[in-house]
Amino acid sequence: MRIRLDLDYDGTDFHGWARQGDSDLRTVQKVLEDNLGMVLRAPVELTVAGRTDAGVHAAGQVAHFDIPRESLQQRSIDGDPTKLVRRLSRLLPEDIRVHGVNYAPEGFDARFSALRRHYVYRITTHPAGPLPTRVRDTAAWPKPVDIQAMQTAADVLIGLHDFVAFCKAKPNASTVRELQEFTWHDVSTPTEPQLYEAHVVADAFCWSMVRSLVGSCMAVGEGRRAGDFTAQLLTATERSPDVPVAPAKGLSLVGVDYPDDDQLRARAEETRAVRGALPGAP
Amino acid sequence: MRIRLDLDYDGTDFHGWARQGDSDLRTVQKVLEDNLGMVLRAPVELTVAGRTDAGVHAAGQVAHFDIPRESLQQRSIDGDPTKLVRRLSRLLPEDIRVHGVNYAPEGFDARFSALRRHYVYRITTHPAGPLPTRVRDTAAWPKPVDIQAMQTAADVLIGLHDFVAFCKAKPNASTVRELQEFTWHDVSTPTEPQLYEAHVVADAFCWSMVRSLVGSCMAVGEGRRAGDFTAQLLTATERSPDVPVAPAKGLSLVGVDYPDDDQLRARAEETRAVRGALPGAP
């Protein structure tokens, strides 16, 4: 049986998503696999839609695992995986929440069936820094910024490009991606003035890409870089040391889109052919 | 010189607002007074608009302190207290933010000049619990609730009443208050379903009053208490053990209203006459 998980986490106190071999490093994958394995009394190995770095959050992450049917027949679950939501909420630490546990449709692969990933980056330029109750998921930038200049710098990045300048190098991994949305929003309130959000959507992201996209736009918005800075970066043939990488804490994976059920297998095969062994960390 | 501070804090890791005598207990007042005293090279004693309990947050707290004029003449401040905002943001821990430092108007008293205090209580009934990035300022309630029933239970509490049933006892302190607003809002989003906010406004609150008002409405909303539960409580002559006190983490002080500057002194005198030594913790 394949099970689909819909989950959220505060990445502050995790070393990212991925289990680090046999080490005891506290990662989301390790804590989740250990707890699921205990409840289901069977080894659990998760495949995730978007591997997130240390400090990066999720409010809409998706994963899947395969489990023998019998593991779900125990009395408290009785073949109904949705019962695991409340059970896990009592077991898991409060910085992980599993809000959906369902049988996955035929052909579903959390990673390879995904059409696109949605990220939000939350950042304030207020001199006093972020609101304390949001300091774990809001980054601070020391200087005021011009949101129009940032949007112009973002617009040139839309479409299919080689984002090598924005990606941490990974041996023989393609850095060609299709950036489908990159919009800046002033979401200031009286309680949180000078607050901005970037909404970033792509088929997939390479390592550190979203934080680099955000950092480069902030540098333009602050006036430290010229308006054509991002366009210049698109012509680079290797990672650029000039790109400021925005802090992890501002970044949240907020959604993963999948095709209709009858397209899931085909999508997975298509992506595997293109991405193959490519890791998907933003 | 009197200085007005506008500030915010995440109450999770504080033992409330008030300094605990000479103890080293980490309170908001102690951390703030110690840092201000260091920067201004003079003892600082804060008077606050609303003393908050351990675990309670603020996004709009107000305080004042008196300081010799010379303390503000040092080179980095140069008589302009607003320069303390950025200075304090570098000094203070990230769970306190001072977003306003200004000369207080003539006659201003953060506590006695206040007209009313605004609180928000944030709570979810989702079986998976709060979104992890909001778990520090969102309470969890195990059962679904009927928001209409909660609103009806809240409506009867509006006006001038003796809220003794809802207040932790304090020797010779009046529990008569004027509850000016108590409204329930469904603020659910796809990311945070089954999420509610109570907006509570009063001239002042007695100890633990807001959390008791919220807890009693939740008990009605969940169906554990009849619809006339809150009306019954208004007839009580002492604190009621039946009132569930909602967890501190859901509560935030979000604003304090003051009269126009020319009314500040009169308001302070009026309130002192009524409240006198009354502590103002919600």
Image: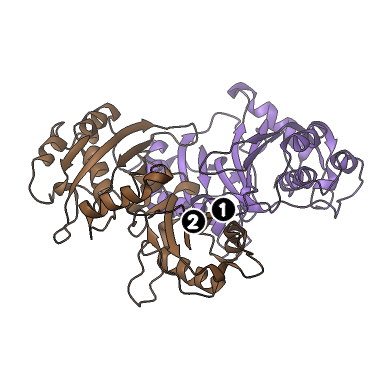
Chain colours: A purple, B brown
| Front disc: 1 or 2 | 1
* Number of the label disc, if any, that sits on residue A22: none
Q: Position of residue B104 (x, y in %)?
A: 47, 55
* Number of the label disc, if any, that sits on residue A11: 1
Q: Nearer the viewer, residue B116 or B189?
A: B116
Q: Nearer the viewer, residue B186 or A125?
A: A125
* Image mark 1: chain: A
Residue type, label 1: Gly
Instruction: Work out which residue is located at the far bottom of the displayed protein and give it.
Output: B22
Q: Measure the alpha-carbon separation of dots 1 and 2.
A: 18 Å
Q: Toward which corner of the image does residue B183 lie, by quadrant?
A: top left
Left or right placement of residue B31 versus residue B78 in this view = left
- Is there any visible trace of residue B256 in the rendered image? no
Q: Toward which corner of the image does residue A196 lie, by quadrant?
A: top right
Q: Nearer the viewer, residue B15 or B99?
A: B99
Q: Which residue corresponds to mark 2?
A: A34
Q: Position of residue B81 (x, y in %)?
A: 57, 59
Q: Residue at x 43, y 45 (%)?
A: B261
Asked if residue B214 is positioned above or below residue B171 in the image, the reply reads above
Left or right placement of residue B171 versus residue B206 in this view = left
Tell me which numbered mark, 1 or 2, is placed earlier along the sequence. 1
Q: Badge 1 local density, few (<14 within 10 Å), some, or many (20+)?
A: many
Asked if residue B231 is positioned above or below residue A41 in the image, the reply reads above
Q: Residue at x 53, y 64 (%)?
A: B93
Residue type, label 2: Asp
Q: Residue at x 14, y 33 (%)?
A: B226
* Image mark 2: chain: A
- Is there any visible trace of residue B194 in the rendered image? yes
Q: Badge 2 local density, few (<14 within 10 Å), some, or many (20+)?
A: some
Q: Secondary structure at mark 1?
A: helix
